[in-house]
């Protein structure tokens, strides 16, 4: 029984261990970055989607090749080498800031959120540095409405942001803050 209690205590302690969360977030970021690279490699060179342009997979999902020269939804298109360099450098600065933040995180959910964003940012920054634009290829649609074309890195960034919002509203820090406000009244 002592062994089981010790294991339980160590597991609980690891949930509050910033070093463990840092490693968890970095491993997740690496997994996302690798998944993004592999998916784009398959789409670009194995499926040869740039030559085929679009492949219908289901009535609501297509593989459609789109090169996004800008940031989210094609905003601020980088139409010159200088503009591409600025976007890549900006992405790398933001990634470094996120890594510093990740090293200080004390809750696993927040580490997951930041790890997802880091992995997605690095995946898209790689595309921008190598190709001058980000390769997007997943297209969902229904009833004549087509959503934006996206990639694995974009999915990771969106889920990371959703988890950040969730954590800011319902996470342990938000709960402690609400409890502190209630007790101070």
Image: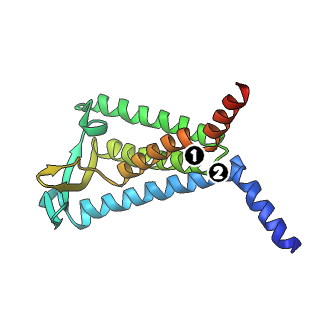
The location of residue 96, given as percent across then percent down, is 54, 37
* Whether residue 113 is situated above or below residue 71 in the rendered picture: below
Q: Which residue is mark 1?
A: 110
Q: Which residue sits at x=77%, y=65%? A: 8
> Where does the C terminus fall, quadrant-wise?
top right
| Rendering coords of residue 97 (x, y %) | 55, 34
Name the residue tied to disc 2: 21
Is 136 on the left or on the right of 31, as rendered? left
Image quadrant in which you'd find residue 54: bottom left
Q: Position of residue 32 (x, y in %)?
A: 45, 56
Q: Say whether disc 1 or disc 2 marks the residue closer to the N-terminus.
A: 2
Q: Nearer the viewer, residue 167 or 118?
A: 167
Residue visible at 15% across and 49% down in the picture: 145
Which residue is at 33% across, 61% downward? 39
The residue at the far right in this view is 2
Q: Please count the marks in the image.
A: 2
Q: Is residue 100 left or right of residue 87?
A: right
Residues 180 and 85: in front is 180
Instruction: Residue 19 in the image: state x and y as whole percent.
Output: 70, 49
- The quarter of the rendered structure image containing the N terminus is bottom right
Q: Measure the alpha-carbon separation of dots 1 and 2.
A: 9 Å
Secondary structure of the residue carrying tag 1 is: helix
Q: Which colour style is shown?
A: rainbow
Task: Please give the name of the residue rendered at 31% of the width and 58% of the height, measured from the top-left corner.
Answer: 40
Contact flag, marks 1 and 2 (Cβ < 8 Å): yes
Q: Residue furthest top?
A: 185
């Amino acid at each position: 029984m002592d062994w089981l209690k010790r294991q339980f205590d160590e597991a609980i302690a690891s949930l509050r261990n910033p070093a463990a969360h840092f490693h968890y977030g970095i491993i997740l970021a690496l997994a996302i970055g690798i998944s993004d690279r592999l998916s784009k490699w398959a789409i670009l060179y194995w499926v040869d989607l740039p030559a085929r342009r679009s492949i219908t997979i289901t009535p609501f999902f297509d593989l459609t090749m789109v090169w996004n020269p800008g940031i989210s939804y094609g905003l601020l298109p980088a139409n010159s080498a200088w503009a591409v360099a600025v976007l890549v450098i900006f992405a790398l600065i933001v990634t470094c800031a996120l890594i510093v933040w990740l090293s200080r995180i004390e809750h696993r959910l927040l580490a997951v959120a930041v790890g997802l964003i880091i992995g997605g940012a690095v995946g898209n920054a790689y595309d921008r540095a190598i190709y001058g634009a980000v390769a997007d290829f997943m297209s969902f649609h229904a009833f004549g409405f087509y959503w934006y074309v996206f990639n694995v890195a974009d999915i990771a960034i969106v889920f990371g942001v959703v988890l950040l919002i969730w954590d800011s509203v319902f996470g342990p820090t938000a709960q402690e803050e609400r409890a502190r406000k209630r007790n101070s009244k």
